[in-house]
Amino acid sequence: DAGVTQSPTHLIKTRGQHVTLRCSPISGHKSVSWYQQVLGQGPQFIFQYYEKEERGRGNFPDRFSARQFPNYSSELNVNALLLGDSALYLCASSQTGGGYNEQFFGPGTRLTVL
Amino acid sequence: AQRVTQPEKLLSVFKGAPVELKCNYSYSGSPELFWYVQYSRQRLQLLLRHISRESIKGFTADLNKGETSFHLKKPFAQEEDSAMYYCALGAAGNKLTFGGGTRVLVKP
């Protein structure tokens, strides 16, 4: 298993555009979480999905949305991009959505907004 | 509100010296604390969690609820310990709240 995979690796967008980031969890994992990591800071929780339902949402504006598909992969969408959205976006998968299951992180997608 | 504070951005130690990374948290419930590590050009990975009370790669961390701390310690640092370390607080639903991170540099 290649572990959690994310695409694309890097992305450059301009202000006002829309972006979609993709994540494939480890086989057998049903929960996916998204984090934003701004340069020099720790990751910040955006969303958690389990069995295609949103189970948690961080303090992010409605421009951020996500969904999980029947195969447990996930997409993170960001509309009306701002310069401040430039960050590394991390996806993490775990076996279940509850308790404190170990989360396995992907390599991230580096988003640059110009 | 949950909050994790790592007061040191950078810790520089010599090989063989002890290293301690500080982590303080704020949480009204029963905390679940973790240390994650990111080695150069690798992805973020779990180092240890307080509930397992085990030593990983010579590192230990004790949860002190009175001081709301979860400091990470290693008695003899090795060059391969050079990495970015994040303390994280877990809440229901797998939400992790991370600290700002501490970069550890172990000099030969």
Image (spheres, coloured by chain):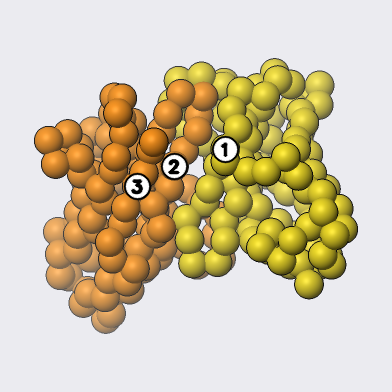
Chain colours: A yellow, B orange
Report if residue A30 is visible in the image: no
Label 2 near label 3: C-beta < 8 Å? yes
Q: Is residue B14 above or below residue B94?
A: below
Q: Which secondary structure, mark 2? A: strand
Q: Which secondary structure, mark 3? A: strand
Q: Nearer the viewer, residue A78 or A28?
A: A78
Q: What amino acid type should be assigned to the residue bearing mark 2? A: Thr
| In this rendering, position of residue A81 left or right of residue A57 | right
Q: Which secondary structure, mark 1? A: loop
Q: How far is mark 3 from mark 1, CA to CA?
A: 15 Å
Label tally? 3
Chain letter for mark 1, please: A
Residue at 12 percent across and 35 percent down: it is: B66
Residue at 21 percent across and 49 percent down: it is: B71
Chain letter for mark 2, please: B
Q: Which picture quadrant has residue B33?
A: top left
Label 2 near label 1: C-beta < 8 Å? no
Q: Position of residue B85 (x, y in %)?
A: 38, 57
Quarter of the picture holding the C terminus of chain B: bottom left
Tag of residue A58: 1
Query: Residue beneath label 3, please?
Result: B4
Report if residue B39 is visible in the image: yes
Q: Position of residue B26 (x, y in %)?
A: 29, 40
Query: Residue beneath label 2, please?
Result: B97
Q: Nearer the viewer, residue A45 or B82?
A: A45
Chain letter for mark 3, please: B
Q: How far is mark 3 from mark 2, CA to CA?
A: 7 Å
Q: Residue furthest bottom?
A: B108
Crowding at label 2, few (<14), some or many (≥20) Cα neighbours within 10 Å?
many
Label 1 near label 3: C-beta < 8 Å? no
